[in-house]
Amino acid sequence: MSLVLALNAGSSSLKISLFRCSAEDAANPVLLLSSSISSVFGPQTKFKFNPVAHQNRLLNEEVNSIRDHASAFTHFLDRLKEEVSVNRTDIKHVAHRVVHGGDYTGPVIISEESYHYIERLADLAPLHNGPALSVIKITIKALPHAKSIAFFDSAFHKHLPTHVATYAINQQIAKERGLRKYGFHGLSYAFILRAVAAQLRKAPDTLNIIALHIGSGASMCAIRNGQSIDTTMGLTPLSGLPGATRAGDVDASLIFHYTSHSPARMSHDPGLSKEVRVTEAEDILNFKSGWKALTGTTDFKEVTEKADLSTLADPMSRATDPNTLAFRILLDRILHYAGAYYLALRGDVDAIVFAGGVGERSIELRHAIGEAVACLGFAAIDKTKNSQIKDDDGIVVDIGKEGDKGKRMLVCHTDEQLEMARECSLVAEFWP
Ligand SMILES: Nc1ncnc2c1ncn2[C@@H]1O[C@H](COP(=O)(O)OP(=O)(O)O)[C@@H](O)[C@H]1O
Ligand SMILES: CC(=O)OP(=O)(O)O
Ligand SMILES: [Mg+2]
């Protein structure tokens, strides 16, 4: 028996689960404790702490001392000390979700070498790799007897076809610098793949789905025969769909026109455009865009509540109200990729799957997507089922109308921590 602590540093949250794992039942870790810190950068940072067998010690409180992922994790460790049912020295493995793994195509034990490799990739996942490393650093000090292992979001997309992963740029430079599509949210897609295959009683390597992971970071993935054949994020988690603070796809030249400096002037001063403006543009497109820039909030629930959804029936709507616009922009970009991925799968699609903080909770977004994709042969969404999903309804919920023979519309309560704990239990080299 051994305990595995799984840590998931998302762009707006830190999610933590503690599992008991055993060699006899490696594929089924048992959850002992879950905790989450949402809105780590504020405002209104919420700390949840749920020791499964001790509901009287459940916490759900606002905490002012948390400013980032590192202080969020320290806060968790302080609470864990008070948790008498957990002996810290029984934690033999700490599984860390690391978004960008570069050339790593499977999990690696954190060593001097792997730590520095992940550090070098930090610029390619500016909202993620740095925060994950800050949590890894604290783990090494606070749990010195435990083995830290990094699990990469990008690993799931390792089989992307070359023409999908390749940008139409100079190939020598692309190869030298690793400039290609990597794709992210892979731990979530791996979990979704397994869970949906079980629900539809298919072998994972025969499953074809269009999966949506919509949270503070939002992406989609076309999965054919259990493998990622395309995904919306690219070299970094910026491209594709807009997110809470990310712009998603823009014309790449936009960065040269964003500031008051004229593009002509910048192109005559290559030093300036490289060292100053591009970095500033990365900051703007990653941290100061998305629905935060459009509406002032990173909370998509608030955006939805303020949006005028009656305008959705009009495809030519000229609505300019910020919340309506933010909702419609996300919907429009999702439908753009849904159509593309339907073609990439040649129409042979078992299901569309909704996951992530927004995908699992936004009744309105699922409804709007359902209305639009019905023309492709997907089952009509059952309004009651769609509006009554609860966190404890089971891992996969079918929201299609009963008896509708169309392709399935599913919601999956994705669990990146469980995916890591399972993988951790199954890799023999982690258990000497
Ligand atoms: N009922 C809801 N409707 C729409 N969005 C929601 C709802 N509840 C939570 N969200 C949104 O989910 C997002 C967080 O998603 P999550 O996947 O947990 O984040 P992270 O990307 O940090 O892992 C936030 O933008 C939050 O506003
Ligand atoms: C890759 C990514 O954007 O992750 P998250 O949604 O957790 O921020
Ligand atoms: Mg996340």
Image (cartoon, helix red, strand yellow):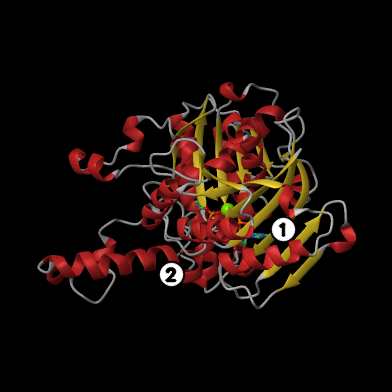
- Classify the position of the N terminus by image quarter: top right
Please state which of residues 129 and 38 is positioned toward the viewer in this rendering. 129
The image position of residue 266, as x and y in percent, is 16, 69
410 is higher (above) or lower (below) than 216: above
State the residue position of label 1: 35
> Is 187 placed above or below 43 here?
above
Q: Nearer the viewer, residue 144 or 74?
A: 144
Please state, as top left, top right, bottom left or bottom right, where the C terminus lies in the image.
top right
The residue pinned by badge 2 equals 288
Left/right placement of residue 107 relative to residue 358 reads left
Does residue 185 appear to the left or right of 162 in the view shown? right
Q: Residue at x 48, y 65 (%)?
A: 245
Judge the density around disc 2: few (<14), some (14-19), many (≥20) Cα neighbours within 10 Å: some
Q: Is residue 48 visible?
A: yes
Give the residue type that dot 1 points to: Ser
N-terminal of the pair, mark 1 or mark 2, is: 1
Q: Which residue is at the far right? A: 56
Q: Residue furthest left?
A: 268
Residue type at mark 2?
Lys
